[in-house]
Amino acid sequence: MKAIQDCYPPKYAHCYGCGHGNPAGYQLKSYLQEGITQARFTPGMQYSGGVPGHVYGGMIASLLDCHGTASAAAFASHERGVAMEEQIEPPRFVTASLKVDFKNPTPQGVELLVRGELISVEGRKVRVALSLHANDVVCATGEMLAIELRAGA
Ligand SMILES: CCCCC/C=C\C/C=C\C/C=C\C/C=C\CCCC(=O)SCCNC(=O)CCNC(=O)[C@H](O)C(C)(C)COP(=O)(O)OP(=O)(O)OC[C@H]1O[C@@H](n2cnc3c(N)ncnc32)[C@H](O)[C@@H]1OP(=O)(O)O
């Protein structure tokens, strides 16, 4: 199955968090399956937070950020009855607002699961509920308002 981010042409593949054309970035890959989006990622040991052995909060927020905008694009496409991979230029969303709640320390050296669920689609505005899990423990939850860029932006 093609990742949501891999549906974009090279000219839009530069994002630090998820662009497949950015060799220095995370190259996060998100997938929509059965109404839920998921991405898996193991942050390098350089992303240490203040507490040894735990992941830096900004890294966690960035995973929710990138997974959220990709999820918004996939959810909006699905609502419009078209799959991401069927579009030459899929809809592009940016983060207008991202709230993160850090629920539990996130351990390093563990594959993290990031999940997204659609809250609502209202024109260009898509709200996504996000969560980040390590070893089946919810470490962070979040909510994003993503906004679709206007054509030509
Ligand atoms: C940078 C472009 C990247 C695109 C790349 C695309 C693909 C890349 C490949 C694969 C990955 C797929 C997606 C990944 C893309 C990026 C990932 C990382 C995500 C980010 O890291 S991305 C960077 C941080 N992000 C920004 O850099 C945004 C700066 N910002 C703006 O560029 C404008 O601000 C914008 C466009 C958001 C809106 O501007 P606009 O002129 O188009 O629209 P407008 O202002 O009219 O708002 C329309 C309606 O949203 C409401 N609204 C707006 N903002 C709100 C807020 N904060 N809270 C509550 N409501 C809000 C209004 O109230 C109105 O609501 P209503 O229609 O009901 O009146």
Image (cartoon, grey):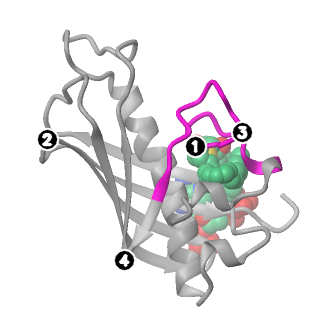
Asked if the residue at tag 2 contacts the one at tag 3, i.e. Cβ–Cβ closer than 8 Å, the answer is no
The residue sitting at 65% across, 72% down in the picture is 85
SS label for mark 3: loop
First of labels 4, 2 by sequence position: 4
Q: Residues within 10 Å of mark 2 (few under 14, many from 20)?
A: few
Determine the main secondary structure of the stretch shown in magenta: loop
Q: Point out which mark residue 35 bears.
A: 4
First of labels 4, 1 by sequence position: 1
> Pointer 1: what residue?
18
Residue 130 visible in the displayed image: yes
Q: Point out which mark residue 21 bears.
A: 3
SS label for mark 1: loop
Q: Which-is-in-front pick, marks 3 and 1?
A: 3
Amino acid carrying label 4: it is: Gly
First of labels 3, 2 by sequence position: 3
> Pointer 2: what residue?
135
SS label for mark 2: loop
Q: Residues within 10 Å of mark 1 (few under 14, many from 20)?
A: many
SS label for mark 4: loop
Can you tell me whether the CB of the residue at mark 1 lies under 8 Å from the nearest atom of ligand 1? Answer: yes
Q: Which-is-in-front pick, marks 3 and 4?
A: 3
Asked if the residue at tag 1 contacts the one at tag 4, i.e. Cβ–Cβ closer than 8 Å, the answer is no
Give me the C-alpha separation between circle 2 and circle 1. Answer: 23 Å
Q: Residues within 10 Å of mark 4 (few under 14, many from 20)?
A: few
Position of residue 52 measured from the top left corner of the image (x, y, whole percent)? 20, 9
Q: Point out which mark residue 70 bears.
A: none
